[in-house]
Amino acid sequence: MKCLEVRRLIPDFLEGQLRAKDYDEVSAHLQACKDCAKEKRLYEESWKLMGQWQDIEPEPGFKSRFWNRLIGQTESAKAPRINIFRLPKRASFALVTAATIIIVVSVALLNYLPSRSAAILASKISEEEMILVENIDLLENLEIIQYIDLLENMEIIENLDKIDLGTV
């Protein structure tokens, strides 16, 4: 047997739980190999020390104190603590609330002011200018149409339906 196999079997060897064949092989290996024999001695010494181990009885009320402390720690971990600048809880809460209100009002004003200024500008625009703004798409297309060479001569466009394309 190899050392790795023997070292894996040493606990069973010491407890007498090996088959006769395996027991003889491990025993022969332990007599020939000093490292594995040393490993066997270490197991024996460890088990001997464990046999001397004595249970310690906790003092009365230990379990209840332990569980109460554990419950107290988990409850305190669940409850968020707001303590800004080492202020009392009420002052911290008030500070957080005030900051939240300021942020909400600022965002609302930033969204309100641009629409308000647009409404002021719209009130100053004349009716003709409003019609132009409403029809801005037509004006943009008119500008594009003006640059097409074919459309410069409007006579051709007016007479398109009269032209016989078969004779051309």
Image (cartoon, grey):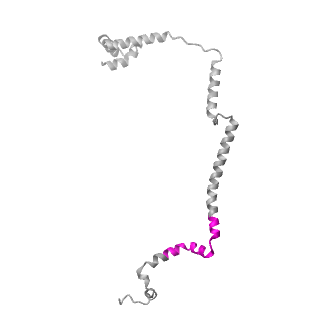
In the image, 139: left or right of 102? left
Viewer-closest of 100 and 86: 86
| Residue 65 is covered by the magenta coloring | no
Q: Position of residue 146 (x, y in %)?
A: 46, 79
In the image, 160: left or right of 2? right
Work out which quarter of the rendered image holds the N terminus and state it.
top left
Whether 161 is drawn above or below 100: the answer is: below
| Residue 138 is covered by the magenta coloring | yes
Q: Image quarter for residue 95?
A: top right
Whether 43 is drawn above or below 86: the answer is: above
Stretch in magenta = 118-141
Q: Position of residue 113 (x, y in %)?
A: 63, 59
Viewer-closest of 41 and 149: 149
Q: Residue at x 64, y 54 (%)?
A: 108
Q: Position of residue 73 (x, y in %)?
A: 62, 28
In the image, 69: left or right of 14? right
Q: Position of residue 70 (x, y in %)?
A: 61, 26
Viewer-closest of 120 and 34: 120
Q: Residue at x 63, y 24 (%)?
A: 69
Work out which quarter of the rendered image holds the C terminus and state it.
bottom left
Please tell me whether the stretch drawn in magenta is mainly helix, strand or loop. Answer: helix
Q: Residue at x 39, y 89 (%)?
A: 164
Q: Image quarter for residue 66?
A: top right
Q: Residue furthest right?
A: 90
